[in-house]
């Protein structure tokens, strides 16, 4: 763990610079540039809103904001997780020539996606104003959601980063699992209202992204305090997963260049 803390301090400036560079490169040849980071989630919000409200005839209070909050959490989680599996091989030019702790590559991607997510959270506030969602003092609890989401996602990603080097099919398996998790996470429906019994508890408590979506909506839309016990529990789980992932990477990263 001391080595991890040392490397995070040593490579922090590099991580921030690399994340900024990737953000600029992502929109370098686009006419709309960074506006795509706004238009993309809004387009998905409109699509799911029309699908659920018009086609299926069901909805939730402040449904467009409800969906946008879900998409904001999901897009960060999905992008980080799916991108971690082949992250080392995608950076083969760096890995084979210069030593960089492999989780630093993951940190770069996480910071990049975190920046884009914060833009989406700013849009959530704008949408709350537009749809006249009442603001409650509980909105301050929203700041507890971000570190838990970051740590849990980072922990899962470190483990997938390691095994993605040795298991070629892991990328495809991960994408299939993420599609399943997407529909089980309540991005465009309320698990608490649509599902009853033990399955409801299982989906809301044992699925971290579903839990964090639900807590975000309770805080921002309904003026409810989050479940501190479960937030702390998932933060601890995220730290544990991160420790496991970082430990495994430290042990085997010298062999990564030979495999890729």
Image (tube, grey):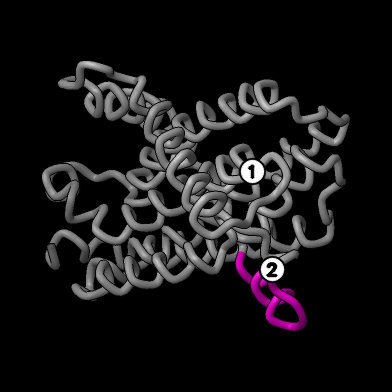
255 lies left or right of 105: left
Q: Is residue 238 visible?
A: no
In percent of the image, x 24 and y 58: which residue is there? 86
Vertical placement of residue 252 versus 82, above or below: below
Vertical placement of residue 219 versus 154, above or below: above
Q: Is residue 175 magenta?
A: no
Residue that extends furthest to the bottom in the rendered view of this protein = 198
Q: Which mark is residue 194?
A: 2
- Which quarter of the figure has residue 210? bottom right
Q: Which residues are magenta?
A: 194-207
- Which quarter of the figure has residue 232? bottom right
Residue at mark 1:
63
26 lies left or right of 69: left
Q: Position of residue 146 (x, y in %)?
A: 63, 41
Q: Which of 6/151 is in front? A: 151
Q: Which of 225/98 is in front? A: 225
**Disc 2 or 1, which lies upstream in sequence?**
1
Vertical placement of residue 69 versus 198, above or below: above
- Quadrant holding the N terminus: bottom right
């Amino acid at each position: 763990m001391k080595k991890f803390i040392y490397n995070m301090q040593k490579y922090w400036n590099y991580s921030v610079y690399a994340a900024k560079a990737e953000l600029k490169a992502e929109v370098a040849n686009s006419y709309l540039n960074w506006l795509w980071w706004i238009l993309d989630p809004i387009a998905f919000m409109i699509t799911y809103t029309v699908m659920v409200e018009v086609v299926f005839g069901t909805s939730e209070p402040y449904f467009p904001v409800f969906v946008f909050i879900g998409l904001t959490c999901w897009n960060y989680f999905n992008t980080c997780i799916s991108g971690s599996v082949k992250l080392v091989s995608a950076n083969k030019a760096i890995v084979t020539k210069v030593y960089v702790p492999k989780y630093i590559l993951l940190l770069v991607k996480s910071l990049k996606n975190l920046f884009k997510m914060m833009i989406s959270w700013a849009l959530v506030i704008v949408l709350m104003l537009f749809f006249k969602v009442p603001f409650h003092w509980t909105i301050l609890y929203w700041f507890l959601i971000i570190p838990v989401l970051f740590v849990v996602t980072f922990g899962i990603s470190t483990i997938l980063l390691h095994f993605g080097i040795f298991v070629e099919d892991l990328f495809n398996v991960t994408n299939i699992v993420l599609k399943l998790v997407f529909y089980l996470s309540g991005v465009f429906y309320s698990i608490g209202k649509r599902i009853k019994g033990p399955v409801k508890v299982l989906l809301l408590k044992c699925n971290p992204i579903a839990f964090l979506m639900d807590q975000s909506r309770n805080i921002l839309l309904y003026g409810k305090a989050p479940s501190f016990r479960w937030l702390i529990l998932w933060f601890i789980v995220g730290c544990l997963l991160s420790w496991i992932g970082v430990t495994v990477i430290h042990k085997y990263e010298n062999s990564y260049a030979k495999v890729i």
